[in-house]
Amino acid sequence: MYINGQTLSHDRHFADHIVAEVPVQIYRDKEHSDIGFIEYYGKEFVKVNNNVYCRKSFTFISRPGY
């Protein structure tokens, strides 16, 4: 499905991670911000651990098996 470290960018990526319950790691620039499961995603935002992250400001990385 996804490899460890793959960047998520399309709606399909976020939807797949919700369905398969695959965690994501979140970065702002090169600084780690959070890791967890996607609760919700929209065109501009992704909700993880009850926090909302802007898709344009943060990078979302797939972490299967984490």
Image (tube, rainbow, N blue to C red):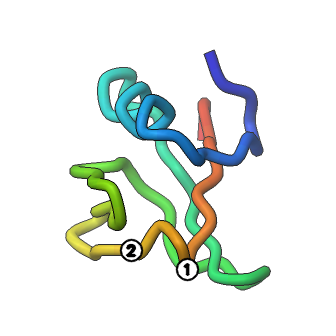
Q: Where residue 56 appears, x then y in whole percent?
A: 53, 73
Q: Residue at x 48, y 44 (%)?
A: 23
Q: Is residue 24 left or right of residue 3?
A: left
> CB of mark 1 within 8 Å of CB of mark 2?
yes
Residue 40 or residue 42, whichever sits in front: 42
Q: Is residue 55 left or right of residue 38?
A: right
Residue 11 or residue 27, whichever sits in front: 11
Q: Where residue 16 appears, x then y in whole percent?
A: 42, 26
Considering every residue shown, the one lying at the far top of the view is 1
Name which residue type carries label 1.
Ser
Q: Which residue is mark 2?
A: 53
Q: Which residue is mark 1?
A: 57
Q: Residue at x 58, y 47 (%)?
A: 9
Q: Residue at x 60, y 45 (%)?
A: 8
Q: Where residue 34 appears, x then y in whole percent?
A: 50, 72
Looking at the rendering, in which quadrant would you find the C terminus? top right
Determine the image quadrant of residue 44. bottom left
Above or below — where is 52 with respect to 9?
A: below
Q: Where residue 39 appears, x then y in whole percent?
A: 23, 50
Q: Residue at x 42, y 56 (%)?
A: 36
Name which residue type carries label 2.
Tyr
Q: Is residue 28 left or right of residue 42?
A: right
Q: CA distance from mark 1 to mark 2?
A: 8 Å
Q: How many marks?
A: 2
Above or below — where is 66 with respect to 60?
A: above
Q: Which mark is residue 5?
A: none
